[in-house]
Amino acid sequence: MSSFEITQTLVDSVVKISQEAGDRIMEIYAKDFDIYEKNDASPLTEADLAAHLHILESLNRISDIPVLSEESSDISWETRKSWNRYWLVDPLDGTKEFIKKNGEFTVNIALIEYGEPTLGVVHAPVLETTYVGWVGVEAYKLHKGSRETISTKPHQSSDVWQVVGSRSHQSPEINKVLSALGGENKLIAMGSSLKLCCVADGTAHVYPRVGPTSEWDTAAAHAVVLAAGGKVTVLNVDKPLDPDASPLRYNQKESVLNPFFMVIS
Ligand SMILES: Nc1ncnc2c1ncn2[C@@H]1O[C@H](COP(=O)(O)O)[C@@H](OP(=O)(O)O)[C@H]1O
Ligand SMILES: [Mg+2]
C-alpha cells in the first residue's frame, strides 16, 4: 500500500498550474486569429499544446504520478491498465467555444484513484473562475480573488428543471430524457466541462449527455460535482433518474470514450 494523500498544498499547486495554463491560452486567445490562417499552426493547436506542455511539466515536477492528457493520449492500454492513480488532463476543453470566442472553454486537471476522481480543478480563463473539487472534503469556486463554497441544489417537486446541455453538440435523444424527467424544464446551452460545474454550484439541476465525450472531458468537473454533493452516472435515456444507475468510472477499458451519462444535483 502506498501512503499517498491529497493535501491542501497539492490542491493549491494544481489550482496554480491550471491558472498558469489558462494564462498561456489567453496569450493566444487575445491575438487576432486571422493572422494564423496564413500559417500552418492553428491558434487552437498552439493554445492546446502550450497548455498541455505547461501542465505536463508542472505535474511531473510536483509528483511522480503518471499523466494522461488529451494531447498525449497515445499511451498503450497495456501500460495504462496498471495505473491505480494518475492525472487525467484536458488542457483545453471546449475547442469550438475557443474558436467562437465566447469564453466557454476550460483547463481540466483531475486525479483519478482506483477508477474514481478524487480531486479536480476546472479553470475558465476568460471567466476568471476556477472550480475545485476535493472529494469528501470540499468544493469551492475561486473568482477574482474571492473564494466561495459551492454545493448542488437538489430539484424540488415544484421546481422547473434547470437542464444544462451542449452548445455545440446536440442530440435529438435529449427530448426523450426531458420527457422522462417530467414537469417543466428550461434548457441552458453551455460549452465544455462548465456544464458539470453548473450542476455543482446549483445553477442547474441536471446535465444529461446523450453524445460522445472522452474521459478527460469529464474527470475534473466530475470531482467538483462529487465534492459538491452531486452524482455522475451512466445514463439510461428512458430512465434518467434511476437511483441504481452505476457511477461513471475511469480507466476501466481500453477505449477512453465515456458512455452517455447523467450529472445530477
Ligand atoms: N464525436 C465525438 N467524439 C468524441 N468526443 C466528442 C465528439 N463530439 C464532441 N466530443 C467531445 O465533447 C467535448 C465538447 O463538449 P461540449 O459539446 O459539451 O462543449 C469535446 O471536447 P474538446 O472541445 O476538448 O474537443 C469533445 O471531446
Ligand atoms: Mg475536451
Image: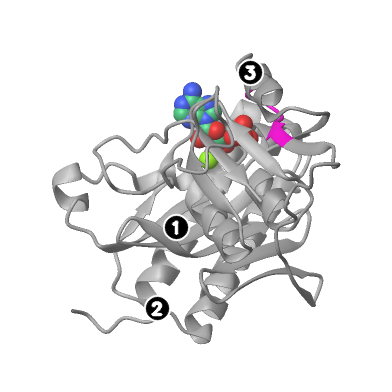
Q: Give above or below for 117 relative to 77.
A: below
Residue 254 in percent (x, y) is at: 24, 38
Q: Residues within 10 Å of mark 3 (few under 14, many from 20)?
A: few
Asked whether the viewer can see residue 41, the reply is no
Q: Nearer the viewer, residue 31 or 232?
A: 232
Identify the residue shown where x is 68% and y is 18%: 175
Q: Which mark is residue 53?
A: 1
The mark nearer the N terminus, 1 or 2, is 1
Q: Give the label, 1 or 3, closer to the camera.
A: 3
Do the residues under discs 1 and 3 have CB atoms within 8 angstroms? Answer: no
Q: Nearer the viewer, residue 145 or 182?
A: 182
| Magenta run includes residue 167 | yes
Q: Give the label, 1 or 2, closer to the camera.
A: 2
Do the residues under discs 1 and 2 have CB atoms within 8 angstroms? Answer: no
Residue type at the position of mark 2: Ile
Q: Locate the N terminus and report the quarter of the image it occupies.
A: bottom left
Q: Secondary structure at mark 1?
A: helix
Residue with the mark numbered 3: 176
Identify the residue shown where x is 76% and y is 55%: 202
Residue with the mark numbered 2: 62
The mark nearer the N terminus, 1 or 3, is 1
* Predominant SS along the magenta part: loop
The mark nearer the N terminus, 2 or 3, is 2
